[in-house]
Amino acid sequence: PPSPPPSLLPSLLPLHTALADPPRTSLTDRSGNYVVDIQKAAAGLEDPLAEPEGAFSTISAALAVAPAGSTVLVRAGTYTERVFVTRPGIQLLAEPGAVVAWRSDKPYEAALTVDLSEAASGGSVTISGLTVRHSSPSIAQNYAVYVPPPSRAASATKVELRDLDVSSSSGSGLGVEGGDVTLLSSKVHDCRNHGLVFLGPSARGAVRGCELAKNKLNGVLLR
């Protein structure tokens, strides 16, 4: 066919260039953060969705691929999942209105668990801004937020929980059975059992600027 007139070439070249550009495949946003957005789940999209501001539909999916040293940003919304942080060096930062809600008829199911029992090294873990709602029928380890003993390699890891809002209709708000855990500027309230529980010789930490209210048993239990 005849070549297009020279005057049309400038308008055709940008179209050709745009079609040739490969799709974005990064798992993070432009700042290197792993973003969780409940709107991805509402739209039935897969994890992750490759787009200019790539995002995951669940917190668990983002944590599964985020390496040590990463920041996971959680957008506002209600996430009906159990969340496990298993690597030191993770920051899990939530926007106002980000809720982890877990209700189960099975025992021993915390909504949020920081489990460094198999970690090969130490570091720090920071979780900030989450609202946690929990119900799971059990006697032992009935916590909305649970921190079991870390591995020997991670025994010096510092876990910082900041600006949380925690409640359990079946058990206690926070259970620390090992490690160094600091709770800052948080609310733990309306728990069926205790507000905070520190159990065992390796459980240590601090509580600063927190509100403990309307928990049926002790505000803080040390044993």
Image: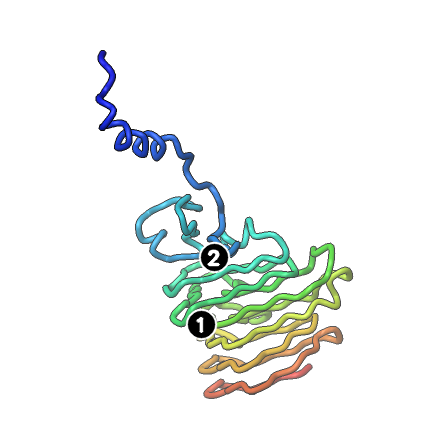
Q: CA distance from mark 2 to mark 1?
A: 13 Å
Q: Secondary structure at mark 2?
A: helix
Residue extending furthest toward the top: 1
Q: Residue at 70% across / 77% down in the picture?
A: 204
Q: Mark 2 belongs to which amino acid? A: Ile
Sequence-wise, the earlier of marks 2 and 1 is 2
Front-lying residue, 220 or 152: 152
Q: Residue at x 50, y 87 (%)?
A: 211
Which three-letter amino acid code belongs to the residue tagged 1?
Thr
Colouring used for the render: rainbow
- Left or right: residue 10 compared with residue 197: left
Q: Is residue 173 above or below residue 99?
A: below
Q: Position of residue 213 (x, y in %)?
A: 48, 88
Rendered location of residue 41, percent (x, y): 36, 52
Q: Which mark is residue 131?
A: 1
Badge 1: residue crowd in 10 Å (few <14, some 14–19, many ≥20): many
Quadrant for the N terminus, please: top left
Against 208, residue 176 (above or below) is above
**Seen from this angle, which residue lies furthest front?**
6
Identified at 49% across, 47% down, the residue is: 27
- Relative depth, front residue between 93 and 31: 31
Task: Give the secondary structure at mark 1.
Answer: strand
**Which residue bears the numbered disc 2?**
59
The quarter holding residue 9 reads: top left
Q: Which mark is residue 157?
A: none
